[in-house]
Amino acid sequence: MLYVRREPLPELVPSPSDQGSYSPRWPGRKLPPLYGQYHEYERRLPQHRWNAPSHASEPKYFWIAGHGRVGSGWGNVMQEILLNAHLSYKANRAYVFHNYTWNDDGSDYSDYNGKPIPSRVPLSALIRGPMIGEPWPEGDPAPLSVSEEYFYHACPERRVVPHNDVHDHLPSWFAADITKGWLDKLNSLDDQCVEAGADGGPPFNWVTFGDKDAMRDLWPELRRSPVLTHFAYSPLVELAFDTNREVFSPTSVLEPPLTSVPFTPSTPTAARYTEIPGLLVLHLRRGDYEGHCAHLARWSSSYMAYNALPELPDRFDPPPGGSWGENTPENVEIYMRHCFPTTAQILARVDELARVDAARGLRDVYVMTNGAVEWVEDLKRALRATGRWRTVASSRDLVLNWEQKYVAQAVDMLIGQRAQMLIGNGWSSLTGNIVVMRLANGRSAESTRFW
């Protein structure tokens, strides 16, 4: 272990002129928002005592410097921060949260398939709750989370724990073993400021999230953690949900919009995000996922850890006959049916699951997808042609403002979390986060399915 110093991070709040301008790098394209007001909100959290003469009386901190970043989708980042925040909570240390960072080279904008996107988005534009500095449930003495920027301000000197100091002594890469290993290490340290070294990556990485058994032992305690039971989406995301409610599930009785219901530390997630009766959500990854699904088939991959929790009814055991890095054409077809289904296969699976008890009363379909507009419209026509659905809508139908456009994944996740039934992709981290929230909020496991 070693002690290190680092200067405070530079100011991240852009000037108003940075928003909505144009750049010669992307001719004719409006630059995305930089979310300056959200950065400023995080800076003004009351536990951020910027002008305090000393920070010695503040709580102990835990900063995971090697967190997922640089090209990681929101689903990948969120699955990691849930476990990191839970680990910090268990250690009775303030969780240090960070920006959702697509590119950490210091640029404001990054190129994504020829389009500009924000290089970083503050977590407060996506989520809210104890993970990003709001109070824990009433009576819970856990220290309040702080931002990365504040951590470096309050902790110019800190103890760095190299990755191998913990992971070389673990019996497995399962989440429960990793949590215990880091808890033992953190509990042995009196240092106020502790950092998980970035030398070997974060405590929980793709190996853990990709193993179907890796969450099994930690899940009973994680599902009761206030990290999950008092999680919420940002007001920006909830506003998008309210604005589009009539698109994906028209209301039959007057319901107060989410944005009109005060968010309080005492309100559990399950009470805020109640089930929407009649709504079926389908998560269908397209685009480059076709190649990803073929890759999964070559390596005989199982469902991801969040999608293989023991109570879930749909299991996937890799079919026999494959070898390391190769698989049979028949097995590849099995993978594609579950991972990248055709329209005919989608319709057949929807018809099959519409007959189970948990599907009684379904009448609206919402398709969460990154698919091309033409493909999405063809699928919607096919769903309507069955004569079963009152409404059929998709991610492409949502009306989003300029800031909501770049957090649209979180909007989809909120819709999926509240659906009466979800049919998701067992290899998708975005599906996995929805699954975890549904189960933690008391949704029936029978109503959470896969292709």
Image (tube, helix red, strand yellow):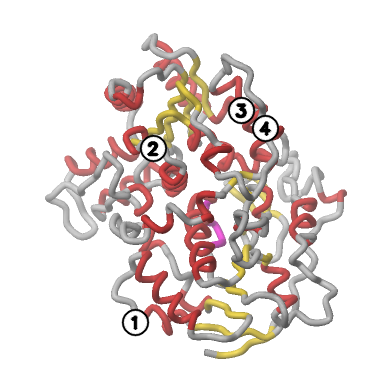
The residue that disc 2 covers is: 424
* Amino acid residing under circle 3: Leu
- Name the spot of residue 338 as percent of width and height, x first: 29, 38
Marking on residue 398: 3
Quarter of the image that includes the C terminus: top left
Position of 441 compared to 129: left or right? left
Select label 3 or label 1 by which is in front.
1
N-terminal label among 2 and 3 = 3
Residue 75 location (% of width, % of height): 50, 50
Q: Residue furthest left?
A: 321
Which of the two discs, 1 and 4, labels the residue nearer the N terminus? 1
Q: Magenta segment range? A: 68-73
Q: Residue at x 86, y 54 (%)?
A: 15
Q: Which residue is mark 4?
A: 400
Secondary element at image label 4: loop
Element type at mark 2 = strand
- Which amino acid type corresponds to the residue marked 2 in the rendered image? Gly
Q: Is residue 450 visible?
A: no
Vertical position of residue 2 compared to residue 447: above or below? below
Which residue position holds label 1? 169
Contact (Cβ within 8 Å) of mark 1 with mark 4: no
- Left or right position of 99 against 51: left
Work out whether 172 lies above or below 190: above
Q: For the residues marked 3 and 4, what is the alpha-carbon distance in whole angstroms?
A: 6 Å
